Image: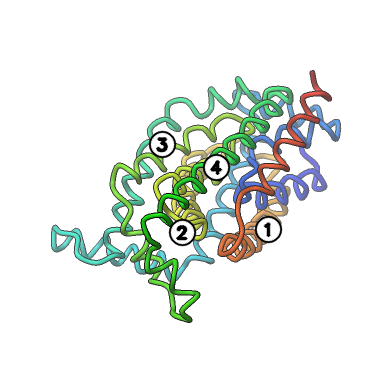
Amino acid sequence: MISYLQAIVIGLLQGVTELFPVSSLGHSVLVPALLGWDAVLRDQSAQESPYLAFLVGLHVATALALLVFFRAEWGRVVHGLVRSLRRRQVETPDERLGWLLVVATIPAGIIGLAFEHTLRILFAKPLAAAVFLTVNGLILLVGEYLRRRQGEVRWSGGPRADDLAPALGQVRTEPARRLASLTVPGALLIGSAQILAFFAGISRSGTTMVAGLVQGLDHEDAARFSFLLATPIILAAGVYKLPDLLGPNGDGVRGQVLAGSAVAAVAAYLSVRFLTRWFTTRTLIPFAAYCLVVGLACIVRFA
């Protein structure tokens, strides 16, 4: 049975690492292993357990925090989708962004329904999580390298108007308008990148941000699209497994679920607030370094 202390620690981990590009699933395996919480590790790789029911609450809480933070943007997107369906055409940036998010959600949604639980059971082991966390660091480094190469090419051909705006004291284009310039194949690529996050140690936000950078988005827009895209996926994962929490597996842990979910919601809100500011001027490099150092250290520890 999970304790209240464990619930609070794991809730904090979920709220922070779900959005930071360092893998929430990987940390939910590594931290309990480092702390000697063997029962939590066993429950995490079980077919059914109170711990998996507990995770339902954390996912819903994280998604709700994202919805609250991006409430204005989601309001415009949902309104745009409804308007687009009525008119049977796409006219505004908000309408196009809404359909891009729908398209990008499909790949991970299909694979998640079919294989998410199987992959969790198979790779919810400390050594595997450490290896994948190290791989995650390499993915972030490669993304930054490719983005820098693209920046050099863009500079040689002349900067975009948005790139010159801050220097000229102008306001950048609205986020929805910038993100709406993303192509449908590009949105599919970003959405497909989420599939890698089913492996414990690979970050959902990290892979989708890298895919966004490869598509030509800057760090700010890549992060924003990643967070918007994560919201329906995380919420759907929680709602889909809600019967686990409401059924026998939830007996005896519902108090811990409330405690952990409250912590996860606050941590997620503060994390997304911090990261949206961070990526206006900074890169993925510090997170890549963290993943490489922690991943390699844990490989040594658990090998």
What amino acid is at disc 3?
Ser
Q: Are marks 3 and 4 in contact (CB under 8 Å)?
A: no
Q: Secondary structure at mark 4?
A: helix
Give the residue at mark 2.
221
- Residue position marked by numbered label 4 in the rendering: 145
Mark 1 → mark 4, Cα distance in angstroms: 30 Å
SS of the residue under disc 2: helix
Asked whether 295 or 11 is in front, the reply is 295
Front tag of 3 and 4: 4
Seen as rendered, the residue at the extreme bottom is 169
The answer to whether residue 138 is left or right of residue 64 is right
Q: Which is nearer the N-term, disc 2 or disc 4? A: 4
Name the amino acid type tagged 4.
Tyr
Task: Report how far apart the C-alphas of labels 3 and 4 lie in the structure.
Answer: 21 Å
Q: Pinpoint residue 5: horizontal percent, then vertical percent.
A: 82, 47
Position of residue 214 measured from the top left corner of the image (x, y, whole percent) = 44, 44
Tag 1, which secondary structure?
helix
Find out whether the residues at labels 1 and 2 contact each other: C-beta distance under 8 Å: no
- Colour scheme shown: rainbow
* In the image, residue 194 above or below residue 287: above
Q: CA distance from mark 2 to mark 4?
A: 18 Å
| Closer to the camera in the image, 99 or 256 | 99
**Which residue corresponds to mark 3?**
192
Quarter holding residue 267: bottom right
